[in-house]
Image (cartoon, coloured by chain):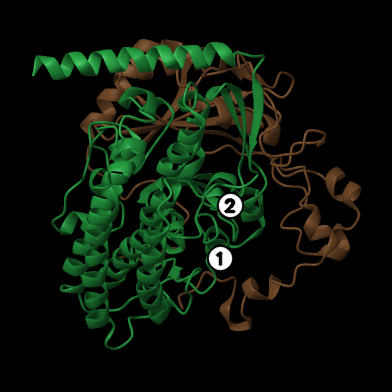
Chain colours: A brown, B green
Amino acid sequence: MSSADSSTDTTEEAPVAETDEAREALLARLSDELGDALVGSHLVAGDDLWIRIARDSWLESARLLRTDLGFAYFSFLSAIDWMPSPYGRSMESQVDLSLEDAASADPEPTEQGVAGGDTRFQILARVNDVSSHLGITLKADVPDDDLSISSWIDVYPGVNWHERECWEMFGIEFSGHSNLEHLYLPGAFEGHPMRKDYPLLARHVKPWPGIVDVEAMPDDGDGEGES
Amino acid sequence: MTDVSDRQKLSYIAAQAADARVNLEIESEGMTLNLGPQHPATHGTLRIIARLDGEQVIKADPVMGYMHRGYEKLTEVRSYPQVTALVNRIDWLGSFANEVPFILAAEKLMEVEAPPRAQWIRTILFEMSRIANVVLFLGDMAVQVGAVTPVFFAFRDREHILNQMEAVTGGRFHPNFDRIGGLKDDLPKGWVDETQQVMKKMRRFCDEIETLVMGNEIFQARTRGIGIIPADVGLSYGLSGANIRGSGVDYDLRRDNPCGLVHDQIDWKVWTHPDGDSFSRFWVRLQEVRESTLMVDQLLSDIPAGPIMAKVPKIIKVPAGEAYVETENPLGAMGYYVVSKGDLVPFRVKIRSASFSNVSITPWLLQGVYVPDIITILGSLYFILGDIDR
């Protein structure tokens, strides 16, 4: 219950982090099997494991996890657009009315999260082992000039709709997926709404009154102080 | 003994022959049957385009998106405390349970832990959401096979739970009660006793349903052996909750990954059923509701004293990082993958909702079933459209 110092920005685990043999063994096994295809990893002892896979080995790593390592349970697949949004929170509706201005403003540097990354778009997926109760999050970089990756549909059939959603929301192709059709959006919809450079148009049409809720109180500095 | 089985064999062969004749007579190009856009039990709007050959489904294509509200995009412009108001509406029958994994993910990133009393009350409300949610399924499932009475029992008894939820949170359907670091308020006076009475009523409801529905011959005929999901297929489609436990997979996040809730501190049992058919999914859910009432009873008798909020800043900024927290919600595993960049708002939230994966098996599952069975199978998978479309 050490909440008073919650403004610390370290993401590392507390120094008392226990060793996590199960996850370490799993990571060792994965790096054995995948070799260079395992580009990055991040392990939080007793909590979670992330690995980053080279794009070409995406399908192969799924096969490995499902058939050899017992990760039979497919949880989800999605993507992250790491580009900082040019529109911010779309709070200042008057300023944001000119969408072109905002889009052409100098972008902040793109920073990727745990397990690293080199590209704007990253695929994100998670599979579980229901007997050892371990879960693992997989990531893969997808370069801007070729937004495609191999589909997992032969390994985990449940990925079907997840890939369709990811395709329409982020515009990432899944080669080997036979039925990349719109899942949520109407067929003639243009654009990929979950991309950061796709504006949340409702905010631009009508100003958002909720900003008062989160403005710093006058005596509260930048909000980092204790209540 | 042999006489009977011979006669049975003959009548079976005769029935098969009759079936074959019928099939031959109506063999055709096939027909497209459009179900919806309305869920047969009106848990939202889903459309299923079924390609039929006679009465058999050749291909079923669910069409979603009628209720897509874009919560993943909206979370990127809402501050962390505001997000709970959105996610309440994902699975609207068990709203409080939607808030829990998101709040837990935010707490994980902030390295805040709710005080024991808050964790305890959270778990109570979490389980009560499950009861409120699944009770409706138990009534609904009977409607799918033509029995209208049980659903009125369900609505009648769910009201008791909703009253208790309202007494604590002020909201019948959308509590918006969970906070980063604890809960908005403490329990009102006299609530514990009242809730214990309500739990007794809910157990009586379970007994009622058990005798009314589960023993019913028609119900059994319509659900036993229908819509069978083998465990490995279910897992590869990401089925969760009672759907996967109804296929004999002993996996329950409340026991196997207790992150922030106190299920590991009470005695309870994970129910599974080996058959994997519609009936077993119903059976598992019925047992789980009863189990939940027992869990709530245990939790109520032992609520620790103390504060209900940890010390958190007034303005919540979540340190940069990524966390995935998944809990066993009424409809199955629900998780939030939260990416923070140290800002007031999440950078990206991926909402893994249970129903989305649970329904994604329907094209596989509905192949070859008869039209009336579509209804019972969909009913037994138990999804809520808000939970599919997000």
Does residue B275 appear left or right of residue A57 in this picture?
A: left
Location of mark 2 (residue): B44
Cα distance between the residues tagged 1 and 2:
19 Å
Mark closer to the observer (1, 2): 2
Q: Looking at the image, which is closer to me, A58 or B132?
A: B132
Q: Amino acid at mark 1?
A: Ala
Question: Considering only vertical position in the picture, is A74 above or below B333?
Answer: above
Q: Looking at the image, which is closer to me, B367 or A140?
A: B367
Query: Residue at image x 76%, y 52%?
Result: A200
Does residue A147 appear left or right of residue B194 in this picture?
A: right
Location of mark 1 (residue): B85
Quadrant position of residue B227: top left
Q: Amino acid at mark 2?
A: Gly
* Residue A114 appears in the picture as rendered: no
Q: Which mark is residue B194?
A: none
Q: Position of residue A222 (x, y in %)?
A: 59, 70
> Which quarter shows the N terminus of chain B?
top left
Q: Position of residue B327 (x, y in %)?
A: 36, 49
Q: Position of residue B56 (x, y in %)?
A: 52, 23
Does residue B316 appear left or right of residue A19 in this picture?
A: right
Query: Residue at image x 29%, y 17%?
Result: B11
Do the numbered discs 1 and 2 sit on residues whose CB atoms are within 8 Å?
no
Chain letter of mark 2 equals B
Asked which secondary structure carries label 1, the reply is: helix
